[in-house]
Amino acid sequence: MTGRDILHKMKVKAGLGTSASDTGKGKTKMSGKQVSHGYHLVKGQSFHRMEDYVVAQFKHAGDSELGLFAIFDGHLGHDVADYLQSHLFDTILKQPNFWTDMEGAIRRAYEITDKKILAKPKELGKGGSTAVTAILIDGSKLVVANVGDSRAVICRNGVAKQLSVDHEPNTERKIIEKKGGFVSKFPGDVPRVDGMLAVARAFGDRGLKLHLSSEPDVRAEIVDLKTEFLVLASDGLWKVMSNQEVVDSIREIKDPQAAAKHLTEEALKRKSKDDISCIVVRFD
């Protein structure tokens, strides 16, 4: 077994996915409920290396057990997404108000993390990353936050419900223009901040930061008996499948790893050319 193989196995065991074709799974019991997760990543057709990173792990914190799930979709390089994979959840959990004001703690951690990224130009470069994070507390409460266009969707009684917000330049045009920026729309292309970035919020992106926000949208959701599963995925999936199509296509697949792989394969069949990363969390 090579050193690379050993490192890969360590990352999978830790719930971290980074390679061009990576997969993993895990399960635990939270307050008597079985919770299982699976993830799968596939590199897109670009010539650069894989820029998607995932976190999918369970962790004890005080008297509670947490499920930590995230997808980081890098652009103009993978370094910022890699940094987020290693540091964002640690920053969130270290906030003094994490247990008393979790939403506030997440907002503060996103702000702190973005400032740290911008303070490391030599190590992390000029690129950036979108992010969608989900924290499951004792199997009963879910707190989702995001910047950018990676998305979180739950299935409740067969119906898809989006928990995140797609931060599109057109939607936030007035905010961008108020900061002195502009939103371009060239024929055959998507709207872009200052003619460059196709999302209105992200970590990093030093050259656009004056016009680009890293403030997350945060939403809390109760996980009840009607809640079947959660899907986190990068835009490589959502560009070619609707929320309800995603839910319908995996509802009968009980193994979350197999479900995540099925979604990436379906996205490829539908000609998605972007990196595709997906996490499925089942509440059995």
Image (spheres, rainbow, N blue to C red):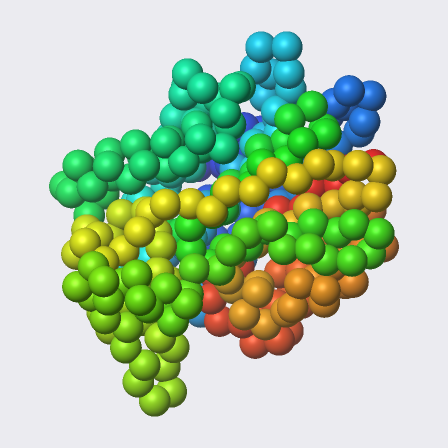
Residue 223 visible, this orientation:
yes
- In this view, 137 is above or below 81: above
* Number of disc labels: 0
- The image quarter containing residue 200 is bottom left
**Picture coordinates of residue 31, whole percent (x, y):** 77, 20
Q: Identify the residue at the far left of this view.
A: 122
The answer to which of 29 and 103 lies nearer the viewer is: 103
Residue at image location 21% in from the left, 52% down from the top: 209
- The image quarter containing residue 47 is bottom left
Residue at image location 28% in from the left, 77% down from the top: 184
The quarter in which the C terminus is drawn is: top right
The answer to which of 2 and 279 lies nearer the viewer is: 279
- In this view, 224 is above or below 105: below
- In this view, 169 is above or below 1: below
Q: Identify the residue at the far bottom of this view.
A: 187
Residue 7 visible, this orientation:
no
Residue at image location 78% in from the left, 58% down from the top: 159
Residue at image location 24% in from the left, 66% down from the top: 177
**Picture coordinates of residue 82, whole percent (x, y):** 37, 41
Report the side of 202 relative to 140 (left or right).
left
The answer to which of 163 and 6 lies nearer the viewer is: 163
**Picture coordinates of residue 91, whole percent (x, y):** 39, 26
- In this view, 30 is above or below 187: above
**Picture coordinates of residue 141, whole percent (x, y):** 67, 31
